[in-house]
Amino acid sequence: EDQVTQSPEALRLQEGESSSLNCSYTVSGLRGLFWYRQDPGKGPEFLFTLYSAGEEKEKERLKATLTKKESFLHITAPKPEDSATYLCAVRSKAAGNKLTFGGGTRVLVKP
Amino acid sequence: DTGVSQDPRHKITKRGQNVTFRCDPISEHNRLYWYRQTLGQGPEFLTYFQNEAQLEKSRLLSDRFSAERPKGSFSTLEIQRTEQGDSAMYLCASSLTGGASGNNEQFFGPGTRLTVL
């Protein structure tokens, strides 16, 4: 069974203070690792897909990286509008088309 | 913008009542998924459709839950005899088989928040 663990559970940052979120996973045949952003009371918003170890994707102040066991979401010089819950999910050969999510990291960026 | 839409956005019901939620996927997407999310947790998979065929159901989906996608477009999720433990956000997502990435990113709707009193 696929497993995804995110750490830390919560992160408080000052505006401009860069940091990284961790997503550790155990799957049988990775077919994609996905990062989403979720604002309170809303559905997850797609950010990135990573397919293989060594791959990197960037979008504005966010950069996602992937190894064979974990993924990192780096937030560079965050702004208050980056405050949200960041969710990591995996899709595997064994599990078919469903996504298995971690519990998320709640990020609060204070001005 | 023709993203995924869900209706209603909020539903409050009494224990034992039946409720039905609707999801309209992105128009060209042939796969549709239902997930459930409780406070402080990530979404959990419930079921998914490819066109009108329901291809997979989670063990989480008890007999009180039923989902349909009769014409391969919108989908409904019905919960019969609701229980307090059914209180959650019900999320719908859609994807396109064989998209450019080949990995079928799922795009989520805003969710339906269910509260069972």
Image (cartoon, rainbow, N blue to C red):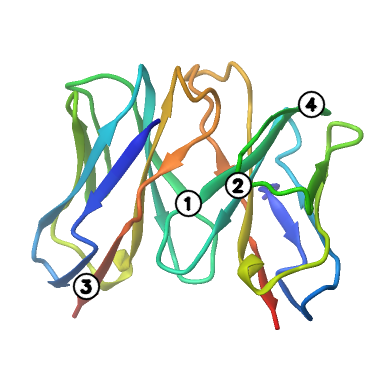
**Left or right: A23 in relation to B91:** left
The answer, for residue A106, to whether it is visible in the render is yes
- Label 2 crowd bin: few (<14), some (14–19), many (20+), radius 10 Å: few
Query: Under tag 3, what secondary structure?
Result: strand
Q: Are marks 2 and 1 in contact (CB under 8 Å)?
A: no
Q: Residue at x 57, y 20 (%)?
A: B99
Type of amino acid at the residue the image marks with label 3: Val
* Residue beneath disc 3: A109
| Front tag of 2 and 1 | 2
Type of amino acid at the residue the image marks with label 4: Asn
Q: Are marks 1 and 3 in contact (CB under 8 Å)?
A: no
Mark on residue A45? 1
* Residue beneath disc 4: B51
Distance CA(mark 4)–CA(mark 1):
23 Å
Pick the residue in front: B70 or B3: B70
**Does label 3 lie on the same chain as label 1?**
yes
Q: Residue at x 35, y 48 (%)?
A: A102
Type of amino acid at the residue the image marks with label 2: Leu
Q: Residue at x 8, y 65 (%)?
A: A17
**Left or right: B97 in relation to A55:** right
* Mark with earlier residue (1, 3): 1
Q: Is residue A19 above or below residue B12?
A: above
Query: Under tag 4, what secondary structure?
Result: loop
**Residue B64 placement (x, y as % from top left):** 78, 54
**Looking at the rendering, in which quadrant would you find the C terminus of chain B?**
bottom right
Mark on residue B6? none
Q: Are marks 4 and 1 in contact (CB under 8 Å)?
A: no
Q: Chain of mark 4?
A: B
**Residue A67 placement (x, y as % from top left):** 17, 27
* Residue beneath disc 2: B60
Distance CA(mark 2)–CA(mark 1):
24 Å
